Amino acid sequence: MSELDLEHLGLEIGIANYTGLLISTLATGIQSFVTVYCLSIFFETSQMDRKGRKPYIVAGFLIALVNFLRTATDMPSVFNTTFRATSGMSFTSTAHWDANQGWDYKLGSICNTLIFVLADGLLLYRCYIVLHGLRWLIVLPTLTYIGTIAFGIILDLTTILKFLDSPARFTISVAEPARVGLSVATNVLITAFVGYRLAMAERSLARVLSLENTRAYTGATHLLVESTLPLSILGICYAAIRFAEIRFISLEHHLHLLVAHPVLEELYFSCLALSPQIIILRVTTGRSWMRAPELTSPLAAFSHSLAFAREPHGSLSALQSNGTHEHSQSADADVSPVSEDIEKA
């Protein structure tokens, strides 16, 4: 490959890393707003309405905190590698990246594992809640979730030992692809199981309520599925990039993967952090499932109370006035013959 090609690809890698940082910063800002908004709504609700929502609030706060730390630890490494680059070819050098990544970058890898644990854990808990009566299906995503945690711990240990220059350090090239692949498998299974279960619940709601009344409930279930579907799609794309780097490929293809890698990585982790946050927001505002959707009592599982329809105030007053007027007319009609008889007498 010519030097000109390396220069061009190196600049693309630098731009991709900067773009990934912008995506992560934007997602962190959105998540911070959603977290504060959920807290304000939670404290404004009554003690009775807060029941069952506190674990969601705590989980959302922890996910937002870890994602904030992850973004903060990525900023110094991206700035140093960009500021100290002498040309586009610097971004293609492994030595250049290693020289400008300190302990903060290693801490970012640990934050990635914590996001896997918290975000996938909350989505798995939601799957357990929704799969009422079919909870044996939760076994498979639980196994992939445990595998994600195991490979995450292995990857973090290798990163820490390498940073400390420990003689006991070791390298497992498949640790990061395996961690991402198992997490994506967990997300895909959760999306499929939750979508199937909520489709059944939607049919049950349609039998009990009218189409207009079920619109609010079925819309919430659809949004619940949609909040994890983009995560599964982005996860498949990101996992494909990670697994493609395992096999032997040419330098040109490897550099092209490095261009796509930071953008897909930040899109995936941002969606991984925001997906449970969207569910928490809907639970906090009373627009999504908080408990298992009972098919025998479909309205009992939602996190908000029912409000009965009432007649408008003007219509009620008019009805009362009409009734009073008709009653007075009938009374006058009954009294008038009596008055005529008295006059004749």
Image (cartoon, helix red, strand yellow):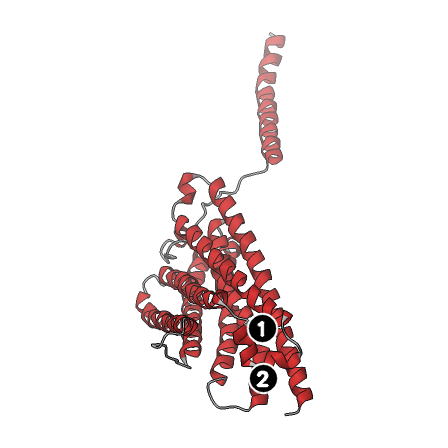
Amino acid type, residue under disc 1 in the picture? Val
Query: Looking at the image, is mark 1 or mark 2 nearer the viewer?
Result: 2
Amino acid type, residue under disc 2 in the picture? Leu
Name the foreground residue: 23 vs 222.
23
- Give the image location of residue 187, x and y in percent: 44, 70
Q: Is residue 324 above or below residue 206?
A: above
- SS at circle 2: helix
Name the foreground residue: 284 vs 176.
176
Residue at the outermost top position: 345
Mark yes or no: residue 302 visible.
no
Q: Is residue 204 left or right of residue 28?
A: left
Mark yes or no: residue 207 visible.
yes
Determine which quarter of the picture holds residue 326: top right
Q: Which residue is mark 2?
A: 255
Q: Is residue 242 left or right of residue 26?
A: left
Name the foreground residue: 76 vs 130.
76
Name the foreground residue: 12 vs 47.
12
Residue at 60%, 67% (x, y): give it.
79
Q: Which residue is mark 1?
A: 263
Q: Is residue 289 above or below residue 15?
A: above
- Give the image location of residue 112, x and y in percent: 45, 67
